[in-house]
Image (cartoon, rainbow, N blue to C red):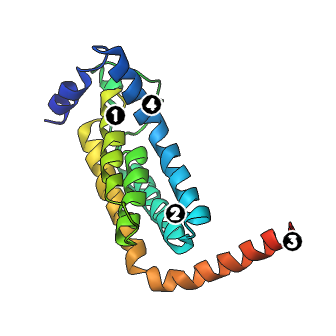
Amino acid sequence: MNQDIFLLINSLANQNHILDIFMIFSAKAMPYIFILLEVYIYFIAKKKNEAIFAFYSVVVSLGLNFIISLFYFHNRPFMDNLGVMLIHHLPDNSFPSDHTSFLFAITFSLIFSKIKYSYVLLFFAFLGGIARIYVGVHYPFDILGGVFSGLFGAIMVYLLKNKLLKFNTLIFKIESRIFKGKR
């Protein structure tokens, strides 16, 4: 089923040049867009705790992915000679998708923090995941694993939120001293 869904989505590649460009952009650039969003939330919207919690969620999620990779290896589709590959990728472990984990850790964290319009990020996180299938570097279950990994990271941080606030206060003091010294 994993291969069948992959082939269904990936079979659209190389059929429409504009769609290919859009999906390549989505597959590669979505994490950078989310980083810019984090910078905006921290520095401009002044929702510093929420931005830091999203960062912590990413760290937990990617840490979980690393632990999973120690015990489980799954080929990427091109390693199984399947589909069309629109972007270059190293032949390494594909489960769960780090890109998707990253996107969903931020998304779920911001939803839990009740950031305005954070539910819109679900669309962009899913788009980033589907794009990774479209360009030929992930199977659908890799993306699903990334969704759950991102959710796990956000839930863990949400459950530890009150304890992490003390650590955030320390970060803000250090930040204040750094920027106070540069004025």
Residue occupying image coordinates x 33% and y 50%: 146
Mark 1 element type: helix
Q: What is the spatial separation of the Cα atoms under label 2 and label 1, in whole angstroms?
A: 23 Å
Residues at marks 3 and 1 touching, judged by CB atoms closer than 8 Å: no
Numbered label attached to residue 25: 4
Q: What residue does disc 2 label?
A: 55
Q: Which residue is mark 3?
A: 181
Three-letter residue code for mark 2: Phe
Quarter occupied by residue 12: top left
Which of pointers 4 and 3 lies earlier in the amino acid sequence? 4
Viewer-side residue, 1 vs 114: 114
| Residue 28 visible in the shown view | yes
Q: Which residue is mark 1?
A: 131
- Do we see residue 85 in this rendering? no
Residue type at numbered disc 4 = Phe
Residue 75 is labelled as: none
Q: CA distance from mark 1 to mark 4?
A: 9 Å
| Distance Cα–Cα, label 3 vs label 1 | 44 Å
Q: Which amino acid type is marked by label 1?
A: Ala
**Residue at image coords 17%, 32%:** 5
